[in-house]
Image (spheres, coloured by chain):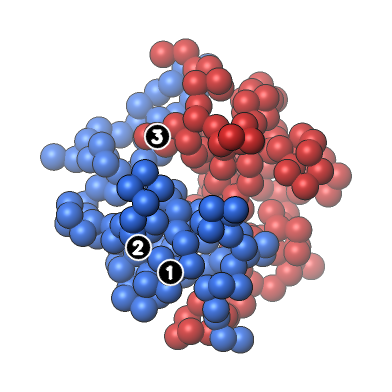
Chain colours: A blue, B red
Amino acid sequence: MGFDPKSLTFTDAGLIPAIAQDAETGDVLMMAWMNAEAVKRTLDTGRVTYWSRSRQAFWVKGESSGHVQELVDFRLDCDRDCLLVTVRQTGPACHTNRRSCFYTAVRDGEEVELMQPMS
Amino acid sequence: MGFDPKSLTFTDAGLIPAIAQDAETGDVLMMAWMNAEAVKRTLDTGRVTYWSRSRQAFWVKGESSGHVQELVDFRLDCDRDCLLVTVRQTGPACHTNRRSCFYTAVRDGEEVELMQPMS
């Protein structure tokens, strides 16, 4: 079945959450948002492209930092309202310079930092 | 640092997306939503508990189906606006009876089904 980005279910703001997972390690790296055009660009270019809600602009991941995400596989969920992209991540995915944005755990009621920024 | 669910960043509807990942295989199983109380209940009980937007009710995953998610680790992202729970998943995570909700890939412009329902 041919895939049409418009067949996805978007929020009222026209967005869909996209989870980025490291294709090699399986680590979940980040979650950000795409609109239909960002989905199309991601598939067409193989460069993962989000929609920045704060800047209201397309955000080709790594375009300025060099920390690009090369698309390995593109998946959608049963409700067509969430995406999973497996990626080859260059360097850190997080703006804090950590490999993953999910570097804080809650254990025994306390926040624990699991990762250091990459050098 | 002590963790307070209210310190998370919620949508206008008071929700935060939560990604569930299989603690053993690393597979991303599903994404659903929590409110502050669901976060608290998840941490207090060790049973992953979402907020059902359609039913407007707490949704203790697997309560009716038996396909429970036992919490292994609870993480938050750098912006405190997305959660990652690693879980021990009993049976399928998806309501279609598949292990993961992300069973559809887009490859060469076509939708491809990667997983069969569990028997």
- Residue A93 placed where, x, y %? 29, 49
**Which quadrant does the C terminus of chain A fall into?**
top left
According to the image, label 1 marks what residue? A37
Q: Chain of mark 2?
A: A
Q: Amino acid at mark 2?
A: Thr
- Determine if marks 3 and 1 fall on one subunit: no
Query: Which residue occupies 67% across, 64% down?
Result: A78
**Relative depth, front residue between B109 and A55:** A55
Mark in front: 1 vs 2: 1
How far, Cα to Cα, is label 1 from label 2? 9 Å
Q: Chain of mark 3?
A: B
Mark in front: 3 vs 1: 1
Q: How many marks?
A: 3
How far, Cα to Cα, is label 3 from label 2? 19 Å
Mark 2, secondary structure of its residue: strand
Q: Along the horizontal axis of the image, is A73 left or right of B48?
A: left
How far, Cα to Cα, is label 3 from label 1? 25 Å
Looking at the image, can residue A22 be seen?
no
According to the image, label 3 marks what residue? B79
- Residue B21 placed where, x, y %? 54, 48
Mark toward the start of the polypeptide (1 vs 2):
1
Residue A16 higher or lower than A54, as above or below: below
Q: Residues within 10 Å of mark 1 (few under 14, many from 20)?
A: some
